[in-house]
Image: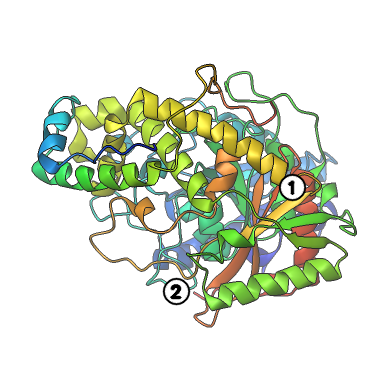
Amino acid sequence: MSSSKAPPTLEEFRVRAAQTGLTLTPEDIEHLHKGYVGLLALMERIPSRWAWAAEPPHVFRADE
Amino acid sequence: MTDLTTLSIADAGRLMARGEITSSALTDAFLKRIEAVDHKIASFITVTADVARAAARQADMEMKGGVRRGPMHGIPFALKDIYETAGIRTTGHSHLKSDYVPVIDAETVRRLKDAGGVLLGKVGTHEFANGAMTPDQPFPAVLNPWNTKHQPGGSSSGSGAAVAAALCMGAMGSDTGGSIRNPAGYCGTAGIKPTYGLVSRCGIFPLAFSLDTAGPLAWTVEDCALMLDVLAGHDPNDQGSAKTAKVDYGAACHRPIKGMRIALARSWYEGKDSVTADMKKGIDEAVRVLKDLGAEVEDVVFPDIWDYHICGRVIITTEAHAIHRQDVIATPEKFGYTTRRRFQLGAFISAEQYLSTLRFRRQLTLDTRACMRGYDLVMTANHWGAPETFEEPQPIFHFLGKPSLTMPFNVTGQPAATVCCGFGSDGFPLSFQLAGHAFDEASVFAAGAAYERATSFRSKRPSL
């Protein structure tokens, strides 16, 4: 998602992880933090500003 | 006497129709080879020898009586172990399902059996078609038959390895981000990810609803077409299933390709990230062969490969989390260490991020369609180079490295086949993809089969 917001630190991520309902080990959280930050960097390619009426497909159909 | 296990489905069908071989002889040859060889590559989780012999006897009896059910009649095949099979355990290569015995067959399995196919057994997969094969899973990792120090690709690992090693004539896989085409490419088989909605997913463990497709791997493109002839068709029990006209894919393999227009997506595999020199040479040579066959091949610049890659990856991460959330909360220790983290990651993706990604998907689909205007097919590399070795620990988030060359056609839903185009200096197969417009599998098969007939790469098998 294109935004200038900095990715979460490990500490910030840990707080967020506690709210997910998942049972996570400290090692899980470290891996997930790396994965999430990496994913966020790649997601810079995805526009975050869309026409408000740009409706996503409910069920993807290749024949639409 | 011909080695029965290296016959193509097409040839075996012709020989059975003429009464020159029986399904029982064919099935016994495969069962013997599985017993003799499979311990070297661990492709099978469950071998259903009795079921196979009974189905083969039935097929022989029917054919002797003049009944011919179609191209899969009497043909031994295997199933990725995420396809539910009545009375036969379906494990998903996971501790979570290691004792699960379904009561009904997946719709695709039902169709294969109705067509007279002979089920040899269930083959290994990345856990739930996603995680890597790690030592904390209940079944051994499947090995690449060309070099057992290397991985066979995934997630339909057992399907690719078993077909290449001549342990079955065809095998079912599933493809959400490349899981049919990766093992097909690394193991040197053919394989097709059909158009989203063409083949039922009912009764197959899901990974990501809006991307999941089911399809065959076989030694030749024509054999994939013959399997798809049996598999394709609307299923009211699959929400994504499309109502489409019946097409004879087997016949499509014999269409001439003179005048066919092919867009070469070279920028995907020769940009900042680049395939190996061997792969580039193999694809360049394949372009020359297709041109000699009368096709027109032109470079076309498509959207950036990373756009498709991240779009598909966010969708898979989010949808897979939704599917497996209860289990990763209740029994995280039952997953392999890569699978668990990949399924957990989706908990951190917001609804807005997911919906923006779906909007992005629509935009990429429309942009791809615009690039393909005036062309019948897209051609591009199937994978970057040699498969990875089995080093522990394996990367948790493999998608942070190079982009997936297979993902574009999962995002757009188009059909895409893997075609072997030679062998590298390291001995591993080289391959390219051919992708068609939605529901135009026929053109994909026509070009792929014409290419295979014009080259000799189908005569080389791994030695085990």
Answer yes or no: is residue B23 visible. Answer: yes
Instruction: Work out whether B327 lies above or below A33.
Output: above
Q: Which residue is mark 2?
A: B147
Q: CA distance from mark 2 to mark 1?
A: 29 Å
Instruction: Work out whether B291 lies above or below A45.
Output: below
Q: Secondary structure at mark 1?
A: helix
Characterize the local packing of mark 1: few (<14), some (14-19) or many (20 or more) Cα atoms within 10 angstroms.
many
* Horizontal and vertical percent position of residue B419: 66, 61
Q: Residue at x 83, y 61 (%)?
A: B296
Host chain of mark 1: B
Which residue is outermost to the bottom?
Answer: B425
Check disc 2 and give the amino acid type: Asn
Res B44 quadrant in image:
bottom left
Using the image as rendered, state which of residue A30 and residue B60 is in the foreground: A30
Host chain of mark 2: B
Q: Which residue is mark 1?
A: B226
Res B369 quadrant in image:
top right
